Amino acid sequence: MTLAFVFPGQGSQSVGMGADLYETYAVAREVFNEVDDALGQKLFALMKDGPEDQLTLTENAQPAIMAVSIAVSRVLEKEFGIACSAAAYVAGHSLGEYSAHAAAGTFSLSDTARLLKLRGQAMQRATPVGVGAMAALIGKADLDLAEKACEAGAAAGVVVIANDNNAGQIVISGMKDAVELAVEKAKELGAKGMLLNVSAPFHSPLMAPAAEEMKAALAEVSIHTPVSTLVANVTAQPIRGKEEIAALLVQQVTGRVRWRETVQWLAGEGGVTTFAELGSGKVLTGMSKRIAPEAASIALNGAADFEAFAQSLKG
C-alpha cells in the first residue's frame, strides 16, 4: 500500500465539528486548547456550539477546519501508532495545504493557526463585500468549457478558474458581474452553474493584497522539511525543498487549486493506492473516488474509522 493523507478545505465546517474527538481523546483536547491559546479566542467553543454564521466566517472556518485535521492526525499517531510519516505523500485543498504542512511538521500547530487566522482576515480585507463572487460549474463542466465561460465573462471584469476539483465540478472566481456573465455562458454551453455563498473571490487576482500579507507573515515563521512529500496546490507537483514552501503558499492565494491534477499525479506517478482524508467531512474522499477510482478512498472522522484504518494497515 502506498498511502496519501489529504486534508479538506473551506466548506467542511459545521457546528459540532471536533466535539466527539474532544470528548474521546486527550490528545485532541490538547490540539484544540493549543489553537485557542495561539489565537487568543475560544474557537473550540464556537466550533462545538456555534453560532453557525460566526463559524463560517473565513477567519474562523480556516483555523477550525485545520484544528480538526490536526486533532485526527495526532489521535492516529498517539492512540493507533500511525504517524504522518506512514503516508508517502500529503496534500490539502486550499487551506487544507496548511493542515498538510502542520501534520507533516513544516509549521508548528500554533504558527499554522495564526497563519490561517491572518489568511482568512487578509482574504476578507482584499475585496469589499459584494464586489467579488464565486460560482460552481457542474454537470458537463470541464476545463475547456470553464475557460470559454471565463473568456465570455471577462467582458464584465476579472473572472478565472479558481478550483479544478474533478470532472464535472469546477469553481470560478472574480468580480461579481463577470462571474454571473460566465455562469450564463456556461449554461449556454451545457453546464449547470450556481453562485456560491462565500464572502470573497478566493483564488483569483483580486486576492493579490492578501498574497502580500501572507508573504510577510510566512517570512516570520520557522519552516521545516515535511516528514512526508507534499504535493502543492498550484503546481500539482511535489515540492522540491523547504525553500519553495513559502513561495508556493503565497502563489496559492491568487492561484488555481489544481486538485484534479494533484490526485491524478498521486495515483499515477506517485503510485498512491489509498487516499485517507483527515478531518471534518468526506468531500475530498468523494472527489478522489471520481478522479482515481482504482485507488481506495476513505474518510477518517471518528473512532470507528480510526480503528478500521489501523486494522487495514496491519493486514
Image (cartoon, rainbow, N blue to C red):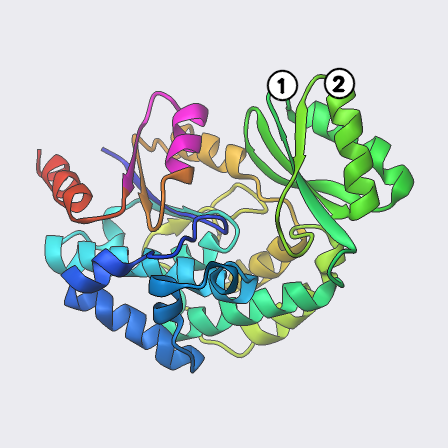
Is residue 293 in the magenta section?
yes
What amino acid is labelled 1 in the image? Answer: Lys
Instruction: Say above or below: 112 vs 140.
Output: below
What amino acid is labelled 2 in the image? Answer: Leu
Is residue 36 in the magenta section?
no
Quadrant housing residue 210:
bottom right
Looking at the picture, how far across and down is residue 21, in whole percent?
22, 58
Looking at the picture, how far across and down is residue 81, in whole percent?
12, 54
Task: Answer few, some or many: residues within 10 Å of disc 1's Cα (few below 14, many 20 plus, some between 14 and 19).
Answer: some
Residue extent of the magenta highlight: 284-299
Looking at the picture, how far across and down is residue 182, in whole percent?
78, 33
How far apart are labels 1 and 2 at the CA level? 9 Å
Q: Are marks 1 and 2 in contact (CB under 8 Å)?
A: yes
Task: Answer few, some or many: residues within 10 Å of disc 2's Cα (few below 14, many 20 plus, some between 14 and 19).
Answer: some
Secondary structure under badge 2? loop
Numbered tag placed on residue 189 in the rendering: 2
Report whether 252 appears left or right of 276: right
Quadrant housing residue 46:
bottom left
Numbered tag placed on residue 140 in the rendering: 1
Q: Quadrant of the N terminus?
A: top left
